[in-house]
Amino acid sequence: MAETAVIAPSLPAGSLRSTLTKLDDELLAASAPGSPALSPTKPSTHADIPSQLPSQPTSQPTSAPSTTKQNPSTPVLALLTHPNPTASSVAPLTTSDATFLCPHWNLPDSARRHRRHSSIAHTGPEAIAQTLADMRRHRTGLEFDVETAFGAGGGSEDVAVFGRAKWESGELGRRVQVPFAVWAKVDKGGRVEFLELVGE
C-alpha cells in the first residue's frame, strides 16, 4: 500500500517568532507583583453585611383581663373598723337603702337599759354612719378584734364575721370585752345591703 504524506502548513518564520514573543510578554506581565490576575481575593468581612437590618416588629404580651374579685367581707370589715364614720365615707360601702341592725351600742348605758327591744334598724348611709359614730362616742376606745370572716357565695354574698369587741366601760371603770357576730349581705357590686351586729 502506498503511504500518503501529510504535509503541515508552513508558517513564516517571522510570524511564529512574533507570536511566541507576545505570549512570553503576556505571561511575564501576569506574573508581575500587583498584577490584577494574581492579586489575592479580598476576604469578606462582617463590614460587608449591611449594618441596618429591617426592624422586626416586637409583639408585646397582652395582659389578660383581671379576674380578681373583691372579698365580700371587705366592705363589712371596713364599716366596723372605720375610725371616723361619716355619710361620705359610708356611702361607697353600702347601697342607698342599706339597713344596719345593732344592739343599742349607739346609746348610753343608762338609756340602753330601758329599751324593750334588743336592737334597732337604721336605714341609709347617713343613718348608718351616725349609728357607727354614736357607738364609738358612747363606747370609749371601741375596737373590733376580728377572729374570722368569710362569705358563703351566691348571687348576693352572705358574710359572717366573728370576734371580740372591746371598749372602756364608764360604769365598771375598766376595759371590757364581749364576743360579737355579724351577719351581712353584700350585693354583686361589693356594697353592703344588710348588716346585723349581735353582741352582749
Image (cartoon, helix red, strand yellow):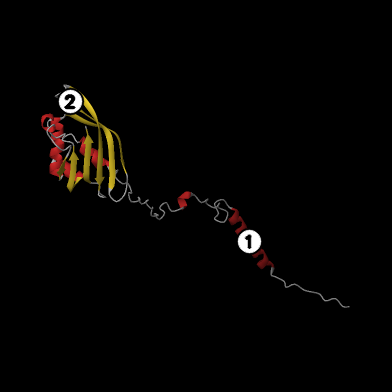
Is 54 on the left-hand or right-hand side of 158? right
Residue 168's mark? Answer: 2
Kind of residue sitting beneath label 2? Glu
Q: Quadrant of residue 194?
A: top left
Q: Residues within 10 Å of mark 2 (few under 14, many from 20)?
A: some
Q: Local crowd at mark 1 within 10 Å, few (<14), some, or many (≥20)? A: few
- CA separation in Å, label 1 and label 2: 124 Å
Q: Residue at x 85, y 76 (%)?
A: 3
Name the side, left or right, on which 22 lies relative to 139: right
Please tell me which residue lies in front, 34 or 102: 102
Disc 1 marks a residue whose amino acid type is Leu
Can you give x and y, in whole percent of width and height, for residue 2 in the image? 87, 78
Asked if residue 166 lies left or right of residue 153, the reply is left
Left or right of 67, for residue 187: left
In the rendered image, the quadrant that contains the N terminus is bottom right
Residue drawn at x 31%, y 40% is 150
Residue 23, disc:
1
Residue furthest to the bottom: 1
Give whichever of discs 1 and 2 has the lower sequence position: 1
Closer to the camera, 10 or 23?
23
As helix, strand or loop, the secondary structure at mark 2 comes to strand
